[in-house]
Amino acid sequence: MSERTDLQVTAALLRQGRRLHGLSLAMLGVVCLWALAAWAMQNSLAAAAWWLGASAVAGMVQVYWALRTDFDADLFEIMSKRENLQQAASDLDASLRELGLIRGGGEPRDWSSRLRGAGCLLCWQAVSAAIQAVLLILAIYGG
């Protein structure tokens, strides 16, 4: 495949993180509703509180990874439309440095290493959502 196609395929793959994000937000909603119901009924959450809190934290971590994957998906889609991909990579690094999103002076990365890194972001997002789900299940059955 060409680098241009690789960029487009990776962008499409990263956009799948939106589904994980939606699922994670639904789990965060369950945690919030559970805590609100327990508070309204003046019921103790002591048994499930730790699991619910940890699930909420994992959900917030997932939100961070979702933002990163969605940002990279948009960047790869934009870059794939550029005429000269080498110049596009250089321009991208310059813009990211100017915005303070990457450190300056580093060795320029090739597209394949950028794509591998973006794939790792999606993996971290999936791991965060999975941990969040496990913790919520523990709250339901262990709390």
Image (cartoon, rainbow, N blue to C red):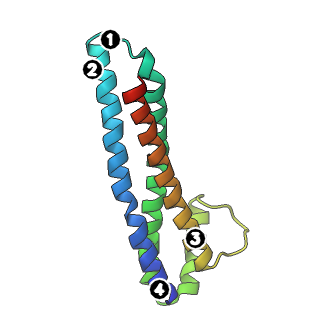
CA separation in Å, label 3 and label 1: 47 Å
CA separation in Å, label 4 and label 2: 51 Å
Q: Which residue is mark 4?
A: 4
Q: Which residue is mark 1?
A: 43
Residue 117 position, x and y percent, is 58, 66
Category of crowding for the residue at label 2, using alpha-carbon neighbours closer than 10 angstroms: few (below 14), some (14–19), many (at least 20)? few
Q: Which residue is mark 2?
A: 37
Helix or strand or loop: what does disc 1 sit on?
loop
CA separation in Å, label 3 and label 2: 43 Å
Q: Which residue is mark 3?
A: 116
Category of crowding for the residue at label 3, using alpha-carbon neighbours closer than 10 angstroms: few (below 14), some (14–19), many (at least 20)? few
Instruction: Name the residue type under label 4.
Output: Arg
Q: Quadrant of residue 104?
A: bottom right
Q: Is residue 122 above or below residue 5?
A: above
CA separation in Å, label 1 and label 4: 56 Å
The reply to whether dot 2 and dot 1 touch (C-beta < 8 Å) is yes
Instruction: Name the residue type under label 2.
Output: Ala
CA separation in Å, label 2 and label 1: 8 Å
The structure residue drawn at horizontal position 26% and vertical position 14%, both measured from the top left corner, is 40
Instruction: Name the residue type under label 3.
Output: Arg
Q: Check the image and name the residue furthest to the top.
A: 42
